[in-house]
């Protein structure tokens, strides 16, 4: 036995880990209590903010769709290459235009008829570069910028819209990559 006294291995009282866990639990409870109070006061503002977010995203997708159409019209040789990407952009617009309240049942808002959507855009057709490669780069740039804006909008988006924005932003980034992919692989 040593001639001096040693400190016991475990100290009496609560351990540091227990204290930290307890403090984290109390802080979480306080935050949740604060969130529920503010969630109730923001409940009236959420639907209109959600509608605005979805309307803006749908408008952006429709604008990008017009750009795809303009590039395909100016460069018919690119039309086949753009067709699947354009179809996805159209689906994105429809997803943002769908009534979020009906999504749980699987029904969506009716999509506009082709004649109505052809007459609806009053915005001028976007200008297209005369060189096909440059036109693709410009289209890729538009996809990338829109994906970045949608990524930034995730910060304030409600959960369901945030997931939709994230998915569409990721698709837009993939489109930008595919559009700038050169003919090296052919």
Image (tube, rainbow, N blue to C red):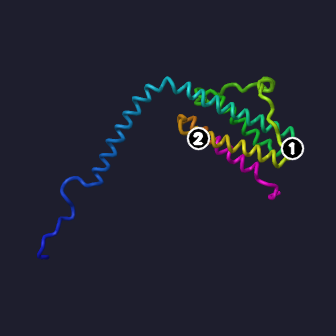
Q: Which residue is mark 1?
A: 130
Helix, strand or loop for disc 2: helix
Residue 124 appears at what percent x and percent y? Answer: 80, 29
Rate crowding at label 1 as few (under 14), some (14 to 19) or many (20 or more) other CA atoms within 10 Å. few
Q: Residue furthest left?
A: 3
Residue 147 colored in magenta in the image: no
137 shown above or below 38: below
Q: Which residues are magenta?
A: 168-186
Residue 169 appears at what percent x and percent y? Answer: 64, 42
Residue 79 lies in quadrant: top right
Q: Nearer the viewer, mark 2 or mark 1?
A: 1
Query: Which of pointers 2 and 1 lies earlier in the amino acid sequence?
Result: 1
**Which residue is rendered at x = 72% and y = 46% of the image?**
175
Comparing 136 with 31, the one in front is 136
Comparing 147 with 82, the one in front is 147
Helix, strand or loop for disc 1: loop
Residue 74 appears at what percent x and percent y? Answer: 87, 39
Residue 184 colored in magenta in the image: yes
Q: Which residue is mark 2?
A: 152
């Amino acid at each position: 036995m040593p001639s001096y006294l040693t400190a016991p291995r475990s100290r009496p009282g609560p351990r540091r880990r227990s204290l930290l866990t307890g403090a984290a639990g109390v802080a979480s409870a306080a935050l949740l209590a604060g969130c529920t109070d503010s969630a109730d006061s923001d409940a009236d503002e959420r639907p209109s903010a959600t509608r605005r977010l979805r309307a803006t995203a749908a408008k952006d997708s429709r604008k990008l769709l017009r750009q795809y159409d303009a590039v395909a019209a100016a460069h018919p040789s690119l039309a086949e290459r753009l067709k699947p990407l354009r179809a996805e952009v159209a689906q994105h617009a429809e997803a943002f235009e769908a009534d979020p309240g009906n999504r749980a049942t699987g029904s969506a808002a009716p999509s506009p008829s082709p004649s109505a959507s052809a007459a609806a855009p009053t915005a001028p057709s976007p200008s297209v570069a005369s060189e096909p490669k440059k036109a693709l780069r410009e289209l890729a740039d538009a996809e990338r910028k829109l994906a970045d804006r949608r990524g930034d909008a995730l910060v304030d988006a409600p959960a369901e819209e945030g997931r939709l924005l994230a998915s569409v932003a990721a698709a837009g980034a993939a489109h930008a990559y595919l559009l700038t992919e050169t003919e090296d692989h052919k």
